[in-house]
Image (cartoon, rainbow, N blue to C red):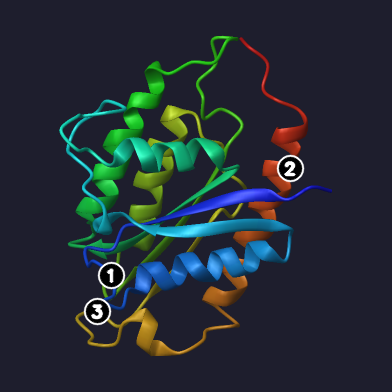
């Protein structure tokens, strides 16, 4: 059983090396995926000059093309985002808008290039909205061709208006930790199935 590859796009508003709860969530998903022979890396999108737009390359130094190559090389894409004002973070929305370009990118069978890739979502925040954010991100990813596994999301939501972030709250093995392990197991299982048997053209 050969290894799969995962990529975490951490959609924190903060650049490195600032602490990021969404990056921690992404790393925890990678740790859980490692138990299923999945290797991967975390990229904090805010560390890169990703331009606004809906094409594969907006030019003028746009760094999305390099990140896109990582997406295309991965079997599993993890979007990890904080909640802001009940919505996915603006960085997350930027990523989804750039992924919209994949609707026009086809392989030699006429299939979208991201068909056969699995998507997982991680959400963190100090306000309600984890289910709403997950739904928005899943719908966008599925629209462009990613496959969503059963129980393919994990989240942590602290006290509303609270001052404790996920990266300060300590381990949550019986709640978020369990959900993270389930999402990772299902994602790895589905990604392996799709790698071994591709979708057929309609």
Image vertical order of residue 25 relative to residue 190, above or below: below
Element class at badge 3: loop
Residue underneath mark 2: 192
- Farthest right residue in view: 1
**Where is residue 97 drawn, in percent x and y?**
27, 35
**Residue at 29% from the left image edge and 68% from the top image edge:** 128
Residue at 47% across, 64% down: 26
Question: Where is mark 1, residue-wise?
Answer: 16
User: Which corner quadrant of the image does residue 180 belong to?
Assistant: bottom right
Which tag, 3 or 2, sits closer to the chain's start?
3
In front: 6, or 69?
A: 69
Q: Are marks 3 and 2 in contact (CB under 8 Å)?
A: no
Which dot, 3 or 1, sits closer to the camera? 1
Residue name at image x 60 percent, y 59 percent? 183
Q: Secondary structure under badge 2?
A: helix
Say which mark, if any, is on residue 160.
Answer: 3
Q: For residue 69, what is the image quadrant?
A: top left
Q: CA distance from mark 3 to mark 2?
A: 39 Å
Q: State how many labels appear.
A: 3
Please rate how many residues cluster around mark 3, counting C-alpha atoms within 10 Å: few if below 14, some from 14 to 19, many from 20. Answer: few
CA gap between label 3 and label 1 equals 26 Å
Along the line of sight, the residue nearer the viewer: 164 or 20: 20
Q: Quadrant of the C terminus?
A: top right
Q: Nearer the viewer, residue 74 or 60?
A: 60
Give the mark toward the camera: 3 or 2.
2
Left or right: residue 137 compared with residue 188: left
Label 1 vs label 2: CA separation?
32 Å
137 relative to 40 in the view: left or right: left
């Amino acid at each position: 059983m050969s290894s799969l590859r995962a990529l975490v796009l951490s959609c924190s508003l903060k650049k490195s090396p600032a602490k990021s709860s969404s990056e921690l969530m992404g790393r925890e998903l990678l740790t859980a995926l490692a138990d299923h022979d999945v290797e991967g890396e975390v990229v904090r999108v805010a560390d890169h000059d990703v331009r606004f737009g809906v094409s594969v390359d907006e030019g003028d130094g746009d760094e999305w093309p390099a990140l896109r190559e990582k997406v295309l090389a991965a079997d599993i894409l993890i979007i990890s985002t904080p909640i802001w004002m009940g919505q996915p973070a603006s960085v997350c929305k930027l990523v989804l808008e750039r992924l919209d370009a994949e609707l026009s990118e086809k392989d030699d069978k006429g299939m979208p290039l991201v068909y056969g890739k699995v998507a997982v979502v991680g959400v963190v925040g100090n306000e309600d909205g984890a289910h709403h954010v997950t739904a928005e991100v899943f719908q966008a990813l599925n629209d462009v061709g990613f496959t969503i596994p059963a129980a393919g999301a994990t989240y942590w939501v602290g006290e509303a208006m609270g001052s404790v972030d996920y990266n300060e709250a300590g381990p949550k093995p019986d709640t978020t930790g369990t959900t993270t392990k389930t999402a990772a197991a299902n994602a790895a299982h589905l990604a392996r199935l799709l790698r071994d048997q591709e979708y057929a053209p309609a």
